[in-house]
Structures are given as C-alpha cells and as structure tokens.
Image (cartoon, grey):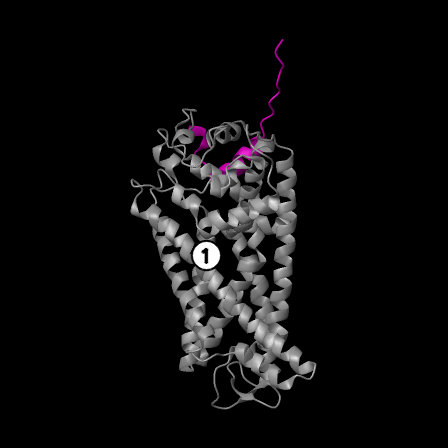
C-alpha cells in the first residue's frame, strides 16, 4: 500500500517569491534542461529543477531550508538555455534574497532591504547620526568647514584659519569614528551569528549524503579552510561556471568578483594599519613607552602623505575596486532581460559600493586640493555609505560572503560536493 502525502501549498510564499525576483517560475514545465546544463549541480538530486517544482507548489519549508540555493553561483547558463524562459537562475537568486531577509534577526531591516521604499530609513539612521555630530562639532569649532593644524603637544588636531582640510579634525576618530563603527561591527557579527546559527540548524534537519569509499567525514573547520582556499581565494566555482564558449560578460563577471574581493582585502589592511597604529601608539604612551608610542602612532597617523606605503596600498585597493565594479556593472546592464533579470538587491549593492568607492576617491582628491566645501560633504556621504554596508551586511546580498561560505563548507562536510583538492 502506498503512503499518502499531503501537500499544503503556501500561496502567500509563492507571491512573495515572485515579488523578489522569481516572477517567471510558473513558466517551468519540468524539462530538466536547467539541471543538465548546470556545470556545478551534483548528479545526485541536482538543482535547480527540484527547486522549480517546490516553488511552483509553494513548498516553503523545503525551499527556505534548501542548501543548494547557496551552491549556485548564478552564472545564468540554466536561464540562457531554458526553452520556456522560466529563468531558474532568477528563482535561486530570489530564494537567496528571501534568505537574506529571514535568516538574520530584526526582520524590519530585512523588510527595508527588500525594496526601494526601505532605502530612506536605512540611510536616515547613519545620516542623522553623522549630521548631529557635524552640527555639534561645528558649534564647538565655530565653522561647518573648519581647517586644522597638528598640535604635537596634545597629539590632536587644532582648528586654525587657513589650515588643512582634515576629516579626523571634524569627525574625530577617537569619539565619532572608531566607537561608532566598533559598535556597528559588533552588531554585524551578532546578525551573522544568529543567521548562520539558523542556517546550520535548518541544514541539520536535511538528509545527509553517504559516499561509498569515503574514509570519514572531515571536520567543519577543515572544510571551511578548504572553501576559503579554493572557492574564495581562487574563485574555482566561478571558473567552473565558464568555459571556452562563455561570452565576454561571464568572464568579466568572474574577474570583477575577484578584483573586488582583493580591493576589499587591501582596504581592510589599510584600515587595520591605521587603527593599530593609532590605538597601539596611544596604549604605549599610556604605559610610559613614549618613544616607541610616537613611532607606532606615526605609522597610523592620518591624513597620510600621498606617497606613504599604506596610502599606496589604498590606491591599489581603490583601483582594483573600480575595475571590478565596472566589470560587474557592465555585465548587469547588458543582461538579456528575457533570460536573466536584475533585482533590487543587485542594484542596491552595486550602487552602494559605487558610492563608497567614488566618495572615498573624491574626498581624498578634494582634501588634497584643500576644497573644504566639497571635501567634507563628500566625506559625510562616504561615512553614510560605509555604515550602510557594514551595519546591514547580514541582510544584504553581500551577506553571501558568509552564508555561502558556511553552506559550501557544510556541503563538503556531508559529502554533497567534493573538497576543492579532490576536484
């Protein structure tokens, strides 16, 4: 006797899925072309065919806990070759968009992130914070566009007439930059911790894969190291998504992702050197090691001269970032909308990163030129952009840096995909 399976479609979920990018899923007639042509899909229970079925039936519980939506790297091959224009690649992107919104806590942020109507409250939070700081500092210093000179005795910037444009004089790092972004960083970590915890809990309830001849299940830590080495640093999954028949835009997408990643690494190193030099020098002076403290402080002292090695690394990071952004934006603009679409999440992230890089470069240029009227407002916008990127990271598309890394590591641990060295 066969068992009866009761299917309870969630029609509200289907409508939500269509709203965040899966609007063409009803066109699918289950030919399985998408799973056959995918260069990454495992032979056992391949994606995205099964996800198309689950989505059409509104099987929310299966989809929201589905590991395979994170294994897809959105190359678009399945959507390009779909005979019905069902855009299965867009469906997996839409599922990830829903995951960004629902994995992390504080669902109100996820709701704001899901549409253009939420942009105002997202931007208003940092805009108000830094506007209040600017007003208070202007009241104290006697100018909204102050100039400064370095007071060696006080180890601080002093407002003077006809001095230099110094962002750290107006938005003092000790009080208005480091503490705020320190709290933002902790908030981001909390969001990711909760999101990853929810993700792994959902994965643990899914069936495991058993590989004949496998000596033993590797540790999650070894799988994480393998994922960082191969999928992140070497971008092997992106390389698997391209071949000799791939068009120029697909190749540029892989290069764009790689260059943008190296740009962020370079800028993180620069930020780390500045923070370590400033606070390390402060700490050494506090414990009485004045000479060494002054040397360490000098390493991280800002604004740095344009020829400083740390500043040169920042130039490299900015150049790599802009190159990557051009490649990714070009691909996004030239997508065939009949085969692959762009969602709000895609354009929000691209626009935000463009804003951060362009305001960072322009603020630097106008600071060197001494044009306070442009330098300070542009730097203000830069602070807002950086705040939005970091604070809302667990709810944004860039959150895949963490979620996809965890999913790939987990998939390797249970044998769903091979270790990078075994490919």
Q: Is residue 140 visible?
A: no
Instruction: Specify the farthest residue to the top.
Output: 1
Residue at image location 61% in from the left, 61% down from the top: 185
Question: To which quarter of the image does residue 136 belong?
Answer: bottom right
Residue 235 location, x and y as percent? Answer: 43, 49
Q: Is residue 209 above or below residue 189?
A: above
The one nearer the camera, 158 or 253, is 253
Quadrant including the C terminus: top left
Residue at image location 63% in from the left, 41% down from the top: 200
The one nearer the camera, 192 or 22, is 192
Residue 371 location, x and y as percent? Answer: 42, 81
- Magenta highlight on residue 229: no
Q: Is residue 183 above or below residue 75?
A: below
The residue beneath circle 1 is 261
Q: Is residue 339 above or below residue 183?
A: above
Q: Is residue 288 visible?
A: yes
Residue 323 location, x and y as percent? Answer: 36, 60
| Residue extent of the magenta highlight | 1-27
Residue 225 location, x and y as percent? Answer: 55, 49
Q: How many marks?
A: 1
Quadrant including the N terminus: top right
Label 1 crowd (10 A; few <14 / some 14-19 / many >=20): some
Residue at image location 50% in from the left, 40% down from the top: 71
Question: To which quarter of the image does residue 237 belong?
Answer: top left
The one nearer the camera, 260 or 5, is 260
Label 1: which secondary element: helix
- Magenta highlight on residue 18: yes
């Amino acid at each position: 006797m066969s068992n009866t399976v009761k299917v309870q479609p969630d029609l509200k979920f289907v409508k939500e899925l269509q709203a965040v990018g899966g609007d063409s899923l009803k066109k699918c007639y289950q030919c399985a072309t998408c799973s056959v042509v995918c260069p990454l899909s495992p032979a056992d229970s391949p994606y995205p065919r099964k996800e198309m079925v689950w989505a059409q039936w509104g099987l929310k519980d299966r989809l929201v806990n589905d590991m395979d939506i994170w294994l897809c790297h959105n190359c678009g091959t399945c959507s390009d070759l779909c005979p019905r224009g069902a855009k299965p690649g867009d469906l997996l992107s839409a599922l990830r968009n829903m995951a960004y919104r629902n994995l992390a806590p504080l669902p109100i942020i996820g709701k704001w992130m899901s549409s253009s109507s939420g942009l105002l409250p997202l931007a208003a939070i940092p805009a108000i914070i830094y506007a209040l700081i600017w007003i208070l500092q202007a009241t104290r210093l006697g100018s909204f566009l102050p100039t400064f000179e370095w007071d060696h005795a006080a180890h601080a910037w002093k407002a003077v007439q006809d001095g230099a444009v110094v962002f750290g004089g107006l938005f003092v790092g000790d009080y208005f930059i480091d503490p705020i972004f320190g709290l933002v960083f902790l908030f981001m970590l909390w969001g990711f911790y909760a999101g990853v915890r929810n993700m792994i809990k959902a994965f643990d309830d899914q069936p495991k894969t058993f590989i004949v001849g496998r000596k033993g299940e590797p540790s999650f830590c070894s799988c994480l190291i393998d994922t960082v080495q191969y999928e992140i640093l070497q971008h092997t999954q992106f390389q698997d998504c391209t071949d000799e028949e791939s068009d120029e835009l697909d190749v540029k997408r892989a290069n764009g992702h790689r260059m943008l990643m190296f740009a962020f690494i370079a800028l993180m190193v620069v930020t780390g050197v500045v923070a370590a030099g400033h606070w390390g020098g402060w700490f050494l002076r506090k414990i009485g090691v004045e000479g060494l403290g002054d040397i360490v402080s000098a390493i991280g002292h800002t604004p740095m001269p344009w020829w400083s090695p740390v500043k040169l690394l920042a130039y490299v990071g900015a150049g790599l970032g802009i190159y990557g952004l051009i490649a990714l934006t070009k691909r996004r603009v030239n997508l065939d909308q009949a085969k692959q679409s762009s969602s709000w999440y895609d354009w929000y992230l691209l626009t935000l990163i463009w804003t951060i890089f362009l305001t960072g470069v322009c603020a630097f240029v106008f600071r060197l030129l001494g044009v306070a009227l442009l330098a300070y407002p542009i730097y203000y916008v830069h602070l807002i952009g950086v705040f939005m990127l970091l604070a809302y990271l667990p709810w944004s598309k860039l959150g895949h840096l963490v979620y996809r890394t965890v999913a790939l590591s987990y998939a390797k641990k249970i044998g769903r995909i091979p270790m990078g060295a075994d490919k």
